[in-house]
Amino acid sequence: MRKPLALAALGAILLVAGSWFALRPRAFGWAAYTPLSDAPLSPGAIVLDGTGVVALLAAATGLALVAGVLGYLLAVRRR
């Protein structure tokens, strides 16, 4: 019973950490020019650089681990 709970805890940590890193604002941009004056800017856009992709993969892995452990715990037969 301890192994599934440890896997669920690891999955939860991966899910939270991956989500936090993926949704952090990124410092990126094109400093050499100013955008067109009539073009709308979207400050809430999520930019996927290398760190963002790895963070989303970690979050997806954590979600799969948590779902798998919960499915296992629901399906296990108890005497």
Image: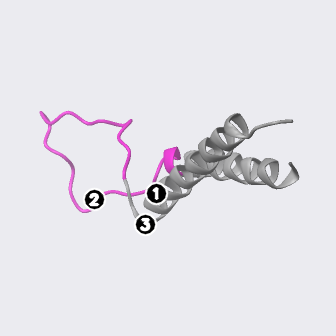
> What residue sits 63% from the left and 39% below the top?
71
Q: Are marks 3 and 1 in contact (CB under 8 Å)?
A: yes
Residue 50, numbered circle: 3
Residue 32, quarter of picture: bottom left
Residue at the farthest bottom position: 50
Q: Are marks 3 and 2 in contact (CB under 8 Å)?
A: no
| 28 over 77 or under it: above or below | below
Q: For mark 2, what is the residue?
A: 30
> What residue sits 86% from the left and 36% below the top?
79
> What residue sits 19% from the left and 46% below the top?
35
> Comparing marks 1 and 2, which lies closer to the viewer?
1
Between residues 17 and 2, which one lies in front from this camera angle?
2
Colouring convention used in this rendered image of the protein? one colour
Q: Secondary structure at mark 1?
A: helix
**How many other residues sit within 10 Å of disc 2, few (<14), some (14-19) or many (≥20)?**
few
Q: CA distance from mark 3 to mark 2?
A: 18 Å
Q: For mark 1, what is the residue?
A: 52
Q: Secondary structure at mark 3?
A: helix
Find the magenta span and give its range.
22-47
**How many other residues sit within 10 Å of disc 3, few (<14), some (14-19) or many (≥20)?**
few
Q: What amino acid type is highlighted by mark number 1?
A: Gly
Q: Is residue 52 magenta?
A: no
Image spot of residue 10 (x, y percent) = 73, 54
Q: CA distance from mark 3 to mark 1?
A: 5 Å
Image spot of residue 4 (x, y percent) = 77, 50
Image spot of residue 2 (x, y percent) = 87, 51
